[in-house]
Image: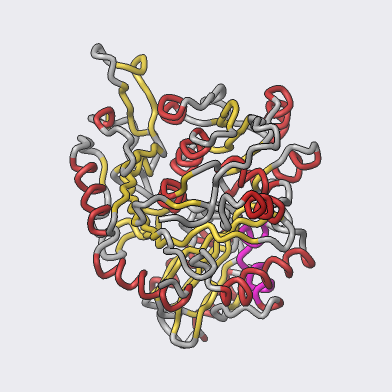
Amino acid sequence: MSFFSLLSNPSSQGVRDLVNCLVLGSGGREHALCDALAHASSCGKLFALPGSDAIAETTGTFCPNIDDTIDQRRVLDFCKRENIGLVVVGPEQPIAEGIADLLMQHEIPTLAPGAKAARIETSKAWAKDIFAQAHIATPRAQVTDSHKEAQIILARWKELPVVLKADGLAQGKGVVVATTRRQAEKAIEQAMVEKRFGKAGATLLFEEYVEGEELSYFALCDGEDNVRFFGVARDYKRALDGDKGENTGGMGAFALAPPLGEHGSMEELAVRESIVLPLLRRLGKKAEPFRGILFLGLIATRSGVQVLEANARLGDPEAQTLLPLLEGDLVETFLAAATGNLARQEARHLESQQTQRTFNFTEAVHSVTVVAAAKGYPAKPQTGSPVENLDRIEASPDLSLFHAGTRLQDGGKDANGKMRFHAQGGRVFSVNARGSSFAEARTLAYKTLQAIDWKEGFYRKDIACDAHTSAFVKTCHAVLKFS
């Protein structure tokens, strides 16, 4: 199946300029990014800061500062020293701190928005104002930075459940869907009194709970009026089966590569015209042009599509689910977005008659990712335990293993030359499988997980179950009009 063209575009002399690339981050999303960039024909040297043992070992990426905290000035110095031609920023924190602003000031192409545009993610209250100004449907909300006022708002809130959101960055864990007033009171105390989310929870949003099917929608933006659909997925935030337990950074996801339609895209124009472009144009006027990957949390309700949230980067584990579906030269397309040249790139493709699209998807169109986490995650994950048999899992056209929180210990390898990985974080690794159906991909993912011996870990057993995938496909039909 073919969709989007990441096919590279040789120059008139038939010679391709190789681009030295740098990925910022060290988790599963960054592992998937390095894996995808490493396969790009225009990728020169590939670096990751800080990176990880697994990223270095499995993708051939240079990770010279695994143990160091990388600040902005050191990143800039590194880019100049290594002649970096493209920086891809994974996590939200460096984006919020303005790494793209600094690098772009020094004419280093960076796939990430500036700090002003990134407020669409770093402040949910500010994002709500932007949605309203752009006339984008979103659940109604009240905002407060006072503990006393929060208690008053809750006392007057009539409908349950109620959604409480920390205003700032909380690593995907700052949202509570409270079905009782006691749960809501506890969420207020954790955010505003116990400071569980630090400064992120100093301001709190009370949001209307709306029912419907959710989609994670991704668009590649170049700071101009050019938008390229990057994919849709569904993720799982709760730690336990049946959407129970605490909110996490994400315990799994699944995605479906779109079939070819009249425009060669699953992207229904109504979504772009009524949500994506109005949002980008308002950001350009209120803050600054948005350049990078826009991640929208959409929900299809009886009254229409609403926006639940907006993020300024690829999701995790959505990245591990979408990127393995892509073929071709990701470096070229990311570079085009980072330099404001998506339209020019597509025009070149049209002129050369290589393709009418900006990406290619693989034939195995169904993608399922299951995350394995350390026991105790997200509150108090147990670290240091060995993860056995990871060496048995080899990448294939239908299977990928992405490390998020592992570390090589005891010299890195055992007497037989096998790599010895130990758990170092909460989410430790993920398995991504592709297939001709969700059932096929899901079966392969769980079969692979069962072959890994890790007694101190756990994973959800209901990722991409039939009920979830059926609802997802129906929602894609209704919202994005693919057939």
Q: Position of residue 471 (x, y in %)?
A: 33, 73
Q: Main secondary structure of the magenta part?
A: helix
Nearer the observer, 189 or 341: 341
Residues in magenta?
Answer: 118-131
Nearer the observer, 391 or 427: 391
Q: Is residue 389 above or below residue 290?
A: above
Q: Position of residue 424 (x, y in %)?
A: 39, 33
Q: Is residue 15 above or below residue 305?
A: above
Q: Position of residue 272 (x, y in %)?
A: 60, 71
Q: Residue at x 34, y 33 (%)?
A: 423
Q: Residue at x 31, y 60 (%)?
A: 245
Quadrant location, the N terminus: bottom left
Q: Position of residue 79 (x, y in %)?
A: 69, 29
Asked whether 120 falls inside the magenta stretch, the response is yes
| Residue 158 in sight | yes
Nearer the observer, 427 or 419: 419
On screen, residue 220 versus residue 456, left or right, reads right
| Residue 373 in sight | no
Give the image quarter of residue 309: bottom right
Q: Residue at x 34, y 35 (%)?
A: 383
On screen, residue 378 versus residue 351, left or right, reads left
Q: Is residue 315 above or below residue 63?
A: below
